[in-house]
């Protein structure tokens, strides 16, 4: 059964990711930027993670393959693309650091290697986290210990929260120095160990729930209830100390699987061909937008001498992404590979 709703939400949330990185909400009066970014836009990455785990769980349940084969195919899809896109995105970062900031070549190479290992350029941390998370999941999948994987992942996700929106708790439990040391060494808590592993495990479990629970009304009610709790969590944390990008919330762990479940049960309202097109477009937008945005910034800073603004940045990135996608699709119409 094709799940058209997932493809629709993938495109929507890919556009949300572009909105985050172009600071589109900043064009609105206060306090709209904070609430739009932290509520709607921050749901994008948890949805992508859970949807990836959900589809991984679908393959594990439906295909007569060993977990090693499924995980191997999954990683082969992600890693080559991640390395290619990361190199493309890393080049303008190195050029800017060298010509504008005067960073020494050896320091540039060290910084690039640091990012490559810990927090890739171009929003590729998501791809790296999926790959590492899948590798860590393999022993649990081999033994079919889904619940154990989820429990271990939840504990690891707790550290990620501590290195993000729940940093204020580090003061309470006197963990500041350990969190700060970790962040200096690894740049972010958003990686495959502390986020990717948990959300992929959650996505696999979500597919099990999908097979067992057919009542869409309950899912929609749960989604509405946790959406209210999510807003309340944002309200409680808005004045608290945080680290990194303030992207991780506790209620994401409930909202993301509920969104995936509701999307998977959505009645088809577009053709399968159009849904596949939307899926491919979401992939293209996600992987291309940071490079387009960086090149636009370089052009405006060094040639034009004037910034375009948040709305113009967003519109330009989406326009160039979609035009380039359509041109490539016309040449490769037979391509049907999906990375999300």
Image: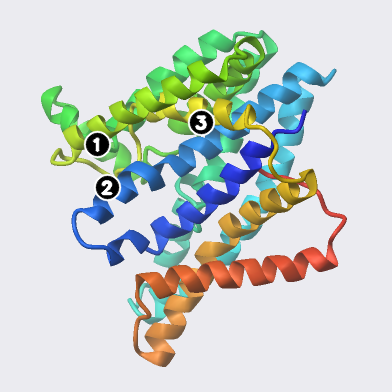
- Residue 274 sits above or below residue 112 on the image: above
Q: Where is residue 96, by image quadrant? A: bottom left
Callout 1 secondary element: helix
Label of residue 35 in the image: 2
Residue count near mark 2 (Cα–Cα under 10 Å), binned few <14, some 14–19, many ≥20: some
Asked if disc 3 and disc 1 are in contact, CB closer than 8 Å, the reply is: no
Determine the secondary structure under disc 2: helix
Which of pointers 1 and 2 lies earlier in the amino acid sequence?
2
The label on residue 43 is none
Residue 196 coordinates in the image, percent (x, y): 51, 32
Q: Which is in the foreground here, disc 3 or disc 1? A: 3
Residue picked out by circle 1: 234
Check disc 3 and report the residue beneath it.
Answer: 259
Instruction: Bin the neighbour count of mark 1 within 10 Å (Cα to Cα): few under 14, some 14-19, many 20 and up.
Output: some
Q: Are marks 1 and 2 in contact (CB under 8 Å)?
A: yes
Camera-side residue of 122 and 262: 262
**Which residue is at 74% across, 47% downward?**
276
State the image coordinates of residue 6 (x, y, percent, origin top left): 62, 37
For the residues labelled 1 and 2, the Cα–Cα distance comes to 8 Å
Q: Is residue 189 left or right of residue 144?
A: left
Q: For label 3, count other residues whose C-alpha is less than 10 Å away and answer few (under 14), some (14-19) or many (20+).
A: many
Residue 181 showing in the rendered view:
yes
Q: Position of residue 228 (x, y in %)?
A: 30, 29
Disc on the earlier residue, 3 or 2: 2
As helix, strand or loop, the secondary structure at mark 3 comes to helix
How far apart in space, not on screen, are marks 3 and 1 (Cα)? 18 Å
Q: Quadrant of the N terminus?
A: top right
């Amino acid at each position: 059964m094709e799940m058209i709703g997932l493809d629709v939400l993938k495109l929507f949330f890919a556009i949300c990711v572009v909105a985050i990185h172009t600071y589109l909400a900043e064009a609105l009066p206060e306090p709209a930027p904070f609430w739009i970014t932290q509520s709607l836009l921050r749901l994008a990455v948890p949805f992508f993670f859970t949807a990836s785990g959900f589809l991984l769980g679908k393959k594990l349940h439906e295909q007569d393959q060993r977990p090693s084969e499924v995980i191997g195919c999954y990683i082969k899809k992600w890693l080559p693309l991640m390395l290619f896109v990361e190199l493309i995105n890393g080049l303008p970062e190195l050029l800017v650091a060298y010509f504008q900031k005067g960073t020494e070549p050896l320091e540039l190479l060290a910084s690039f290697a640091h990012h490559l290992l810990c927090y890739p350029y171009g929003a590729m941390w998501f791809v790296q986290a999926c790959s590492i998370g899948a590798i860590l999941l393999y022993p649990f999948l081999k033994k079919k210990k889904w619940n154990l994987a989820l429990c271990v992942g939840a504990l690891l996700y707790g550290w990620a929260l501590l290195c993000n929106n729940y940093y204020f708790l580090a003061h309470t439990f006197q963990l500041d120095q350990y969190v700060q040391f970790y962040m200096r060494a690894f740049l972010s808590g958003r990686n495959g160990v502390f986020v990717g592993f948990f959300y992929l495990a959650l996505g696999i479990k979500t597919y099990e729930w999908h097979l067992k629970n057919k009542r869409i009304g309950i899912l929609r009610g749960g989604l509405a209830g946790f959406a209210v709790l999510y807003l309340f969590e944002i309200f409680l944390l808005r004045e608290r100390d945080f680290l990194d990008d303030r992207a991780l919330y506790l209620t994401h762990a409930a909202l993301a699987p509920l969104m995936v479940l509701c999307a998977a049960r959505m009645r088809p309202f577009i053709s399968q061909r159009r849904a596949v097109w939307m899926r491919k477009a979401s992939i293209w937008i996600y992987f291309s937008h940071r490079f387009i945005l960086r090149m636009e910034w370089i052009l405006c800073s060094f040639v034009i001498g004037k910034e375009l603004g948040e709305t113009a940045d967003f519109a330009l990135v989406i326009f160039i992404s979609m035009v380039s996608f359509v041109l490539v699709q016309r040449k490769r119409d037979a391509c049907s590979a999906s990375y999300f």
